[in-house]
Amino acid sequence: MDIVLKQLTLPACLWMQAGVVKKKHCYKDFLCMDCRFDRALTKVCRANETLKNQGNAVEGKQRGFVFWEERLRKLPPAQRPCIHHMKGHIGFKNCPKSYQCADCEFDQYFQDQFKVHTVLKPVNFEDINGISLPMGYYLHPGHTWIKIEDQGMVRVGIDDFACRLLGEFDTFTAPLMGKKLTQGMPAVTLSRQGHDVCFLSPVSGIITAVNARVRKTPGRINQSPYTDGWMFILYCPGLKQDLKQLMFMESSRGFMEQQVHRLYTFLEEKTQVKAADGGTLVSDLFGNLPGISWKALVKKFIPQGS
């Protein structure tokens, strides 16, 4: 009985809403990329499409299977439901772009309103010689962080140490939607006045959103690295395993203290000026210390991966 009641509360799968299949509920909160059923039907539809393009007839049980978007395109334009309506996010709205969401201004607006404008609010910050360290965030040795959200999603950004080290960025090369990232491998490139730095992905996953505000104004990262300066959102099916490679709470604090100590030592070696014990690190070390090259700072403190 409990199973039946649970099924009744689940939304209908996109394939069912389009009329491709008679009955199928969505158990993945419309995260189709992680759905075996979606992958299986997509494979069948691609095979059918190939046969049709070759001039061959599709026979057997798979004959009636077409992509759900193709089935809905047969409806009059005013009756084609927007995918956000199908997912239960909004009331009825028709799709004017024939399900080419990349070209849809409303889709971009929706992403902006419900994802980009989200502001993270850390429980608390610790101050380590002027470097902010947020409570409740996981850190990666490559100076990236994650904040765990719902449904296997994590929000990703870079830490305050990297921001203070390199100063305000002017270019953000974002990964493409749907791109798979691997923990410890290059994820994004940030630039300042023609100087590039790569940051590694803290976990493995698939890009589901990119911060459009940061894409437009990369300096937001430096202004609010842990809140509205986040870079992208990942769907991480293997998150539990990936977390074992990250730092949290005490280990994060120890790591940051170690990095600050290494930076003091580095600055003393390069400038011959002894850093004051317990001193506060200023913002934009690269901009304030013209004798130290960008390449040297990145090589010393920001792992670039293979």
Image: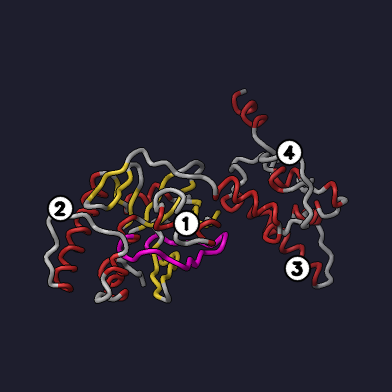
Marks 2 and 4, how far apart in space? 56 Å
N-term mark: 2 or 3 = 3
Q: Residue at x 55, y 54 (%)?
A: 209
Residue pointed to by mark 2: 278
Marks 2 and 3, how far apart in space? 67 Å
| Residue 203: % across, % down | 41, 55
How packed mark 4 is, by other alpha carbons closer than 10 Å (few <14, some 14-19, many 20 or more), is: few
Magenta stretch prevailing secondary structure: loop
Q: Quadrant of the N terminus?
A: top right
Q: Is the residue under label 3 in contact with that under label 2 (CB below 8 Å)?
A: no
Q: Quadrant of the C terminus?
A: bottom left
Q: Is the residue under label 4 in contact with that under label 1 (CB below 8 Å)?
A: no
Q: Nearer the viewer, residue 186 or 131?
A: 131
What amino acid does circle 2 point to?
A: Gly
Marks 1 and 3, how far apart in space? 38 Å
Local SS, label 3? helix
Q: Nearer the viewer, residue 291 or 145?
A: 291
Q: Nearer the viewer, mark 2 or mark 1?
A: 2
| Residue 25: % across, % down | 67, 39
N-term mark: 1 or 4 = 4
Local SS, label 4? loop
Please tell me in which quadrant of the rendered image residue 16 appears.
top right
Tell me the tag on residue 231. Answer: 1
Residue pointed to by mark 3: 50
Marks 3 and 4, how far apart in space? 36 Å
What amino acid does circle 1 point to?
A: Met
N-term mark: 2 or 1 = 1
Q: Residue at x 36, y 38 (%)?
A: 123
Q: Is the residue under label 4 in contact with that under label 3 (CB below 8 Å)?
A: no
N-term mark: 3 or 4 = 3
Local SS, label 2? loop
Tell me the tag on residue 91. Answer: 4
